Amino acid sequence: MCLEGISRKFKEWLGLKHESNTKTVKGKVVVMKKNMLDFDDFGAAVFDNVSELFGKHISIQFISITHPDPGSSEDRLRGKLGKPAILEGWIDTSGSVAAEESTYGITFDWDEEIGLPGAFLVKNFHPNEFYFKTLTLEDVPSHGEVHFVCNSWVYPAEKYNADRIFFANKAYLPGETPELLRPYREDELVVLRGNGLGLREEWDRVYDYDVYNDLANKDDPRPILGGSSEYPYPRRGRTGRSKTESATYEIRLPITKISKIYVPRDEKFLHLKRSEFIAYELEAVLKFLLSGFDALFDDTIDEFDSFEDVMKLYRGGLKLDEGNSFNMILKNTALHLLKELGRSDGEGLSKYVEPQVIQADPSAWSTDEEFAREMLAGVNPVSIQLLKEFPPTSKLDAQVYGSQHSSIRPHHIEEHLDGLDVDEVVKANRLFILDYHDLLMPYVKRINETSSKIYATRTLLLLQKDGTLKPIAIELSLPHPDDEKLGAVSKVCTPSKLGVEAEIWKLAKAYVVVNDSGVHQLISHWLNTHAVIEPFVIATNRQLSVLHPIYKLLHPHFRDTMNINASARAILISSGGVIEKTFFSGKYSLELCSKIYTKWAFPNQALPKDLLLRGMAVEDSNSPHGLRLTIEDYPYAVDGLDIWSAIKTWVQDYCMCYYKTDAMVQNDIELQSWWKELREEGHGDMRHESWWPNMSSVQDVIDNCTIIIWISSALHAAVNFGQYPFAGYPPNRPTLSRRLLPEPNTPEYDELATNPEKAFLKTVGSQTQSLISVTLIEILSRHTSDEIYLGQRECPKWTMDPEPLEAFEIFGNKLKEIEERMVKRNQDERLKNRYGPVKVPYTLLHPSSEKGLTGRGIPNSVSI
């Protein structure tokens, strides 16, 4: 043996390391195993551990951005691949940092020619997928710590046609991408776009478009939404499921299998949200309610007899058998919602949390003041508008519908105008309207041929000196019974406090709220947030690389959206779904929604533009945010403008870190492809509209991204999380009406005089319909424990670029200041619209929240 060999052996015997030219770099990997995330696959860990014992590991190879791969072509150089390294200690769980997370070490033999890694390939040779959170290299020679944010499912290597790649969390515009990373960046986008063919499998990472052809089937037809001038609609994610024999509809999955509807796996709920919200519970409970109670919808034999009867929903109503068998089921089931409906504490089925709207005063909801206030600070504060001409006019085609102009005249309202005449209050900008006449009149006849009975409504309101609104007239309109072309037949109701006329007024308000509830759920909520944002989710993943700064800006605002929309298509908006069964629009719901989409325009979703269009604000450079509100105490607008301004400042600060000139925007091939695809495919039915903004300047990028973030976060929060606080008490927000106003000398009219509560409750939804509605909105109004709110990120090291991190910290601090101001506003007794008779403070645009039913909090995304 030579002296060098003897020396090496001697050092080993002494426990000293052998000196070598080979360097090693250590890393830390954080993953979540499948068995910790999937309730239906606890055995995954066993099979993965066995694969480890047989030498089938998880390997990682780094990709250099400083040294080319000698085998790559000169015209498309690729970064050199490092030697594979294996995830260490998979079977040993001592590295767990949380119940669902595990941290593992990984050691690389560091080739100097790798230099700085810009990406890595991962190959999973286990039989099951795992969730890859982060990888951190602790001390890369000459570069220090390098961090990779992954947040993605990695399936077995055999499932993929291309290697899984993750990039370091540094942003690059396409033209600034290190040359050796460019082919990897381009290839990854090709994988994400797919080929538009075939059934998508759960491990596919393909984002593609389709029309809404999965809401019905041949036995229960509905129009296909999207792809036609008759029924335009935003696109949804393509699943590639089989079609019916006529190739008309995509075959729907059974309600028990809605979790199998394809959305890219990284868009699906993680375990916490799944367990708290949709892990079987929504499927099971709604199946129970929709199928088990089906007969009740036909006969509507179940009625509330009084408002006290309604209160049993919150004090314990229908009792379930609570014997040993039932308790055993509850003990061993993951159906959290079923536990809530059938509590074992003796409260029984239908025991719900008491909604805020009745907590302080069980009858305050019925006042005129609260009826009007909720148009400014309730769950649908985006429909009221300034009345600029009196009487109100219609834009409906008179050739088709006859005269649809309002029948409200000065004599109807003059006694309520504080001594002024109509022209004076109009000129003073004190007359407002909630106008659903033109929107609904084309559907009233067809809807009224079903079990629903509605009016097309117009509601006039006067702005009083104390800043509150007072309803002064409600117009209830029906098509002419002989021919729709003969125009509307209308009845004008005005406030009354005595006798049957007072009850007629209460019913008139109920018809208005029924209209408002349907418009809120179908338009303000579903269409204008959920549906319109899904094409942005798809296009962003198809056209913007994860390395693109705009991808990094927008990606948090798309979390869970495709998943919740897929569930909604299966349960809520499909034929025979919850919306059709519990809202007045019934089987015409989505057709109506499609017609309203023709009036949607992307730039009008900006809050300032929306307020200007509705006459709720005027431009004023001396006012905060450059707008002076027509109603100074308009909580949604006041709080919303603060949030809007903070978002826009953050987006501006961020975008200007990367785009220094307009030419950089124009030459950004990914950005231009993204914007083109959004218009021509994602919102393809609107592609020829002249209102589409340009994407040719830095300001265009700022403006358009601000609108996207506003829709995804604050707008959705404003119209979603107030549902249970206000509509959890059905009489306050009825969703359908089952009969029209009673005529004199009829039994219904007599009942209205002798038992007005019973007559009111017979007019709106039945017990069962109310139970389903309350069940639904309680689920939709809750925050889950894994929610990420505006101003927060899932990972604090979401980018390596220091300027965006600093700007984001400023944004978060700004939101905290805004929330403090909101709290002070709610304490100002002069601002009567912030509390109202029901004493419910306006908190829907408070940025932060805790888990649960809070009536506050702005999640980053349309995530529920």
Image (spheres, rainbow, N blue to C red):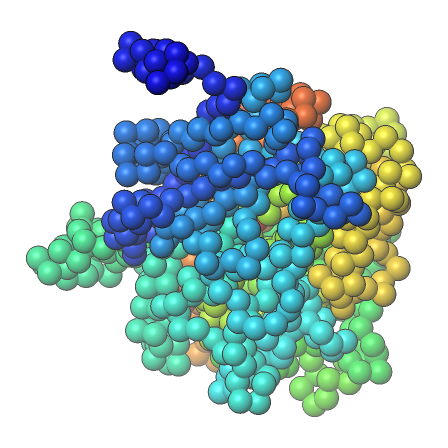
Q: Position of residue 160 (x, y in %)?
A: 51, 58
Instruction: Tell how many labels.
Output: 0
Residue 593, by quadrant, is: bottom right
Left or right side of 783 for 594:
right
Left or right side of 579 for 406:
right
Image point 37% across, 63% down: which residue?
Answer: 283
Residue 755, by quadrant, is: bottom left
Residue 98, by quadrant, is: top left
The N terminus sits in image quarter: top left
Check the image and report above or below for 493 versus 138.
below
Image point 52% across, 52% down: which residue?
Answer: 267
Left or right side of 734 for 808:
right
Asked whether residue 737 is in view, the answer is no
Image point 47% across, 18% down: which residue?
Answer: 20
**Which of the pair 732/6 is nearer the observer?**
6
Check the image and report above or below for 256 versus 278.
below
Q: Position of residue 223 (x, y in %)?
A: 62, 79
Q: Position of residue 610 (x, y in %)?
A: 76, 48
Q: Residue furthest left?
A: 324
Q: Position of residue 842 (x, y in %)?
A: 56, 36
Asked whether residue 232 is in view, the answer is yes
Q: Residue furthest front?
A: 1
Left or right side of 412 for 534:
left
**Which of the pair 298/547 is nearer the observer?**
547
Image point 18% across, 53% down: which residue?
Answer: 332
